[in-house]
Amino acid sequence: MELLYALIRRFEGLRLVAYLCPAGVWTVGYGSTGGDIVRGVKWAKEHAEKRMQEQAQGFDYAAKKLCPILWLSDPEKTAAIADFAYNLGATRLAGSTLRKKINAQDWPAAQLELRKWVYGGGMKLPGLVIRREVEARMLG
């Protein structure tokens, strides 16, 4: 899980006051979203860390449930796909061609699919390009 936590910390960054992300969603901590996060919400760093770890564990499990091969894969592959799910949600992973490629163990095709998920709010975001590239390389 430490590798997943490190990915999330690196790419989400830590913001202790709620902000609107590029997709227009209220976000706080390490990219946490949800009904309890609205304008003006402030978190302590300890709370943000705890929430991130709890959510990361849930997305790790969801990624493995949707892509059972990850139970048997190396930790880098699992962390990469769990990070994708943390960033975009398990629903996006569930309905994706990426999931089909992972379950077929077609890792080169999965790398290509990951690199397509670089848009937020209708714009290509440089941070997502870098994040997807790191995740794609972890599948290699």
Image (cartoon, rainbow, N blue to C red):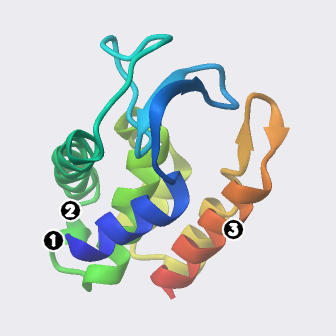
Which mark is first along the chain, 2 or 3?
2
Label 3: how many Cα within 10 Å (few below 14, some 14–19, many 20+): some
* Amino acid carrying mark 1 in the image: Trp
The reply to whether callout 2 and callout 1 are in contact (CB within 8 Å) is: yes
> Residue at 43% of width from left, 32% of height from top?
28
Name the secondary structure under disc 3: helix
Q: Is residue 95 visible?
A: no
Q: Is residue 76 above or below residue 34?
A: below
Q: Earlier in the sequence, mark 1 or mark 3?
A: 1
Q: Nearer the viewer, mark 3 or mark 2?
A: 3
Q: Position of residue 2 (x, y in %)?
A: 23, 74
Contact? badges 1 and 3 (CB < 8 Å): no
Mark 1 sits on what residue?
71
Give the left or right position of residue 108, taking residue 4 as reference: right
Residue 82 in view, yes or no: yes
**Front in this rendered view, residue 56 or 70:** 56
- Other residues around mark 2 within 10 Å, as few (<14) / some (14–19) / many (≥20): some
Residue 102 x %, y %: 41, 66
Residue 77 appears in which quarter of the rendering?
Answer: bottom left
Residue 97 percent across, percent down from the top left: 54, 51
Query: Mark 3 and mark 2: span between their CA atoms?
Result: 26 Å
Question: Dot 1: what SS?
Answer: helix
Distance from label 1 to label 3 (Cα)?
Answer: 26 Å
Residue that carries the numbered disc 2 in the rendered image:
68
Residue that carries the numbered disc 3 in the rendered image: 130
Q: Residues within 10 Å of mark 1 (few under 14, many from 20)?
A: some
Q: Quadrant of residue 72?
A: bottom left
Depth order, front residue of 63/3: 3
Q: Amino acid at mark 2?
A: Pro
- Image point 17% across, 53% down: which residue? 57
Q: Of 8 and 62, which appears nearest the observer?
A: 8
